Amino acid sequence: MIPNVLAIAGSDPSGGAGIQADLKSIQACGGYGMAALTALTAQSTQGVSGVHVPPVGFLRQQLDALASDIRIDAVKIGMLPSSAVIDEVVSWIDALPAKPPIVLDPVMVASSGDRLIDPDAVIALERLIARADVVTPNLPELAALLGEPVASSWPFAREQAARLAQRHGVLVLAKGGHLPGQETPDALIGVDGAVAQFLGARISTTSTHGTGCSLSSALAAIYARHGDWAVAARLARTWLRGAIAAASELEVGAPGGHGPLHHAYALWAGQAFPGAGAELTTWWDDVEPIRSAIDDLWFVRQLADGTLAREDFDNYLAQDALYLHCYARALERAAELAPTEPEREFWASGAQACLESELALHEARVGAVVGADDEPEPSEETISYLSHLAASAGTGDYGILTAAILPCYWVYQDVGEKLARVNHPGHPYADWLTMYGSPEFAASTRQAIAWVQRAARTATNDQLGRMREAFEQSCRYELAFFAQRTAVAVA
């Protein structure tokens, strides 16, 4: 079912925010967008120069016309410029035979700093919040709704969101974009605390016009498809970050302003709309029990504190050397199957890195050359993992193979990043920790994730299911590989 999503908000003739951004976001996220206008603005990327509010009776005519004819699967509410407009929307909601899911973006101030609602409307918003399912204020809006100072730290922002959630019995999507620093955390918070938290590095851009409008509309559209607010928040946030990152492809507005997002970035690239099954962040979250089990393994804990016996480490590296030799062949096959030249170059360079840099380190430590007469016997864990990769390569499907390959990047990068925090020049395994905790390996991992994500979003349902199965199986083999203890020692 394609959900029908209604946006109740003001207009932005520049197309970056308001109703225009709402409709673009809803369509990009798989919904059919509808609109009821609460205000007309004169604005551009440089700021707002005028606001015209039509009679509230005409707003009610728009809303009644839609409700009498069209099934409404979700509602996003944005700019409501006065208390009279807010009261009319509340009255309309209360008159509906069944309340649809409602996302309220309490728009008060534009990105340019221009105020968009009357002071008395802030008080009236209290009545509307009680009708919403999720409220998505930025930090200044959150503070205004509580009558408190604007949060200057993420813990305080979460506390404020929790107070708002408890006051009205709603979910609050706390957004950390206004905080200083290079991290922009978000969290979905309910009356009992955080439902989900999302971390991510700040995207360096001035194209932030309409981010709040776009996120809330995406959240409504995706929830209407999946029925889970935590999943919808994660997918909407992932989509939004992509739209922000791709904004540089547009040429809208003069220098010095706030440019719009690229709402159609995924659609124009031939990618499907955000869906739980196709988003790698969902895959990663779903294998969290496996990742936690890896972190708790004796091998990882002893590697971290430097107490790991040399024999155990050498046995592990001997198996890893055998693994990497065959893993390189899987990477070479991925390069052969890749649909674009940049992807071919990436996987081919990864294969070369396995055969050169990583194997060189293993051979220096273990003192054995793969293919030599004293080569160790592969363990059962190594054989199983390599058989899985070979079977994935044998499908001839680029998406399935790269999904099977990815955990060797992603899991190692995750473990390596944690181990890098305890690394020091005197650590007995400093060279190994440095390799997998390096910025270069992290960059390669991000690129590998991006290529597999692209493949997942363009896959058929059958391909997608097989890709995810291959990914999860590789994660299970990563756990078994780290856990092995009785591998045959190097002669």
Image (spheres, rainbow, N blue to C red):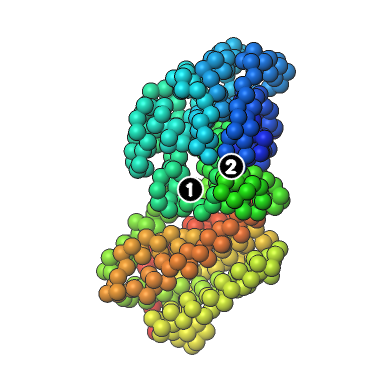
Q: How many marks?
A: 2
- Name the residue at the front extreme: 49
Q: Quadrant of residue 299?
A: bottom left
Q: Is residue 462 left or right of residue 405?
A: right
**Residue 316 picture location, percent across and down:** 40, 72
Q: Amino acid at mark 2?
A: Gln
- Secondary structure beneath label 2: loop
14 and 269: which is toward the camera: 14
In the rendered image, is residue 368 in sight? yes
Mark 1 neighbour class, 10 Å CA radius: few under 14, some 14 to 19, many 20 or more: few
Earlier sequence position, callout 1 versus callout 2: 2
In the picture of the structure, the residue carrying the numbered disc 2 is 46
- Name the residue at the bottom extreme: 373
In the picture of the structure, the residue carrying the numbered disc 1 is 285
313 and 108: which is toward the camera: 108
Q: Is residue 366 left or right of residue 408?
A: left
Q: Mark 1 near mark 2, Cβ–Cβ under 8 Å? A: no
- Secondary structure beneath label 1: helix
In the rendered image, is residue 22 in sight? no
213 and 120: which is toward the camera: 120
* 3D distance between C-alphas at marks 1 and 2: 39 Å
Mark 2 neighbour class, 10 Å CA radius: few under 14, some 14 to 19, many 20 or more: some
Q: Amino acid at mark 1?
A: Asp
**Residue 115 picture location, percent across and down:** 51, 31
Quarter the N terminus occupies: top right
Q: Is residue 335 left or right of residue 486?
A: right
- Please give the label number shown on residue 362: none
Does residue 328 sit above or below 253 in this rendering?
A: below
**Residue at point 49%, 47% (across, down):** 286
**Residue 183 picture location, percent across and down:** 43, 51
**Residue at point 54%, 52% (across, down):** 205
